[in-house]
């Protein structure tokens, strides 16, 4: 059977009063949505809520799942939309539902649990229950449970859980142990690894995905031998074999009860980077994203974000009364903005998405100087969750719009020249939409700023050596120092000079920017 293309999918999710999560509203993409955030943002609650509503029939809410100290029941509301017109018509309990939101057919399901009773209801566009009767609402709920079931997928290379639904996997475990074993006396025999993979493939391919035929990997598994013939001299092919085995094993050992043929489930993937080398993860994800499923992923890996569409990222921030999901909407950034930002910020500075605040700077000298200056003053920007982000190549407007979309606190540092004043005007306009702190250096460049703040001797020495005189003009000396050492090299030499007496030699404006950014980061945690 060929893999079926997109069917109905989860568009929006609302959770209230579930396992410590007081409230969450989450907008999802029809392909992949990636969730990032601080610890305790509600990952367990989200997983539990989805499994209770769309998972196998024995994963239901219990009274103990209700958040303590709150008023009201557990509530989970889902907006399920068609990917192709007419999909609801193929499912009798959904076909007759009057469901239209902004011109799209959408089923709005709300599941409420209180006092040991779970009640589903179907809502209209205004959020009010339709007068369907309990049996019709339950039938619609069960139909959705079968059409878009939640399947939790573990991509770890470790041993899987052992319960009634786990298949024997001796050959798979042997293959993984051989593949992941540390090299003690040189790399293990490639041929031995491939023989292990062949045995595991034979074992797995005998076990059809009976309960979810749309996820059957038998075709891909049977195609693997063609890669084995070349894997000895093309290691990437062997990595792909390994990735295929992990993906197939994860699907076979997942709880797929209730998932029928032709469905397009929601795959919940929790921290796919765990225990995986980035190259293997890349191979594995390239397979998982081809599965006919909607994917909901949590991660703490900047490397993994490098493979994800910028618009798929949701940054979750926990507040005292709710968890807020911030993400880029289509209207926020143009395709050109996305291309520039995807390369410059995500690929080169992927960790910036996990920060609590950004310091925006124009160029390399600032990028290298600020963390070092903070360290000399006794601060650790990484530990505080502050990231320095260059904006000149990606475009200040684009970076500011991205920061606003993610609700990322920002302090910008710009030069005092004409370009810097132009940047300052942009920031002032942006400040009316999303607050942004600003520092304009009292100099045309940060190098000239360092010169004026008592580091002229260090710049002269960097340009001309220890015997340098003071007759050169600042501009010529700065250019010669950069030509000799590059901007990052000059920044390191200036930091060495400041380290002799940080309290006197670290310029005040830089110290103020660092203190401001740390304050923003700490406020973002406190909410």
Image (cartoon, helix red, strand yellow):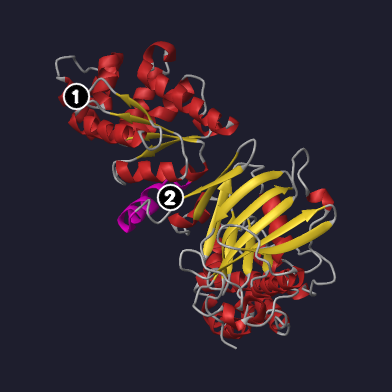
Most common secondary structure along the magenta stretch: helix
Res. 249 visible in picture = no
- Residue at position x 76%, y 68% from top? 134
Report, in whole angstroms, how far the alpha carbon at label 2 lies from the one at label 1. Answer: 35 Å
- Residue at position x 66%, y 52% from top? 15
The residue where tag 1 is placed is 477
**Is 327 drawn above or below residue 191 in the view shown?**
above
> What x and y, as percent, mark residue 124?
59, 63
> What x and y, as percent, mark residue 98?
58, 71
Badge 1 marks a residue whose secondary structure is helix
Question: Does residue 78 show up magenta in the picture?
Answer: no
**Is 224 drawn above or below residue 235 in the view shown?**
below
Residue 495 is labelled as none
Residue 346 is labelled as 2
- Which quadrant of the figure contains the C terminus? top right
User: Bounds of the magenta span?
Assistant: 334-350
Say whether residue 278 is left or right of residue 94.
Answer: left
């Amino acid at each position: 059977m060929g893999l079926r293309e997109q069917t109905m999918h989860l568009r929006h999710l609302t959770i209230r009063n579930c396992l410590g999560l007081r409230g969450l509203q989450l907008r999802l993409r029809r392909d992949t949505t990636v969730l990032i955030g601080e610890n305790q943002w509600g990952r367990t609650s989200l997983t539990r809520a989805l499994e209770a509503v769309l998972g196998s029939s024995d994963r239901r809410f219990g009274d103990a799942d209700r958040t303590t100290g709150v008023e009201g029941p557990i509530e989970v509301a889902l907006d399920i939309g068609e990917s192709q017109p007419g999909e609801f018509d193929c499912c009798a309990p959904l076909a007759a539902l009057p469901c239209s939101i902004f011109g799209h057919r959408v089923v709005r399901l709300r599941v409420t649990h209180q006092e040991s009773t779970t009640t589903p209801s179907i809502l209209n566009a205004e959020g009010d229950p339709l007068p369907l009767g309990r049996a019709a609402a339950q039938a619609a709920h069960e139909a959705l449970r079968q059409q878009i079931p939640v399947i939790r997928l573990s991509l770890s290379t470790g041993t899987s859980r052992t319960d009634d639904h786990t298949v024997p996997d001796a050959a798979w475990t042997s293959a993984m142990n051989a593949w992941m074993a540390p090299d003690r006396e040189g790399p293990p025999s490639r041929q031995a690894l491939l023989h292990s993979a062949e045995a595991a493939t034979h074992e797995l391919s005998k076990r059809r995905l009976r309960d979810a035929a749309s996820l059957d990997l038998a075709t891909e598994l049977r195609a693997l031998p063609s890669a084995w013939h070349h894997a000895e001299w093309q290691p990437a092919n062997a990595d792909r074999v390994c990735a295929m085995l992990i993906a197939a094993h994860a699907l076979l050992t997942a709880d797929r009860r209730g998932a029928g043929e032709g469905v397009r489930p929601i795959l919940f993937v929790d921290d796919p980077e765990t225990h995986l080398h980035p190259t293997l993860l890349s191979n594995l994800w390239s397979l998982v994203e081809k599965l006919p499923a909607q994917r909901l992923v949590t991660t703490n890996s900047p490397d993994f974000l490098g493979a994800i569409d910028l618009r798929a990222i949701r940054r979750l921030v926990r507040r005292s009364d709710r968890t807020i999901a911030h993400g880029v909407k289509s209207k926020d950034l143009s395709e050109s903005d996305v291309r520039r930002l995807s390369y410059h910020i995500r690929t080169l500075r992927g960790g910036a998405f996990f920060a609590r605040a950004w310091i925006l700077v124009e160029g390399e000298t600032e990028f290298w100087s600020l963390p070092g200056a903070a360290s000399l003053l006794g601060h650790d920007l990484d530990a505080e969750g502050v990231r320095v982000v260059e904006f000149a190549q990606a475009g200040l407007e684009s970076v500011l719009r991205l920061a606003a979309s993610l609700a990322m606190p920002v302090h910008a540092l710009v030069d005092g020249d004409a370009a810097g004043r132009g940047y300052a005007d942009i920031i002032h306009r942006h400040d009316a939409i999303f607050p942004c702190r600003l520092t304009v250096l009292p100099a045309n460049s940060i190098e000239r700023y360092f010169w004026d703040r008592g580091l002229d001797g260090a710049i002269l020495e960097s340009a001309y050596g220890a015997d340098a005189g003071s007759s050169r003009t600042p501009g010529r000396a700065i250019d010669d120092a950069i030509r000799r050492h590059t901007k990052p090299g000059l920044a390191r030499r200036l930091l060495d000079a400041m380290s002799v007496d940080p309290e006197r030699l670290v310029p005040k404006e830089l110290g103020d920017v660092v203190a401001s950014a740390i304050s923003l980061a700490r406020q973002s945690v406190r909410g």
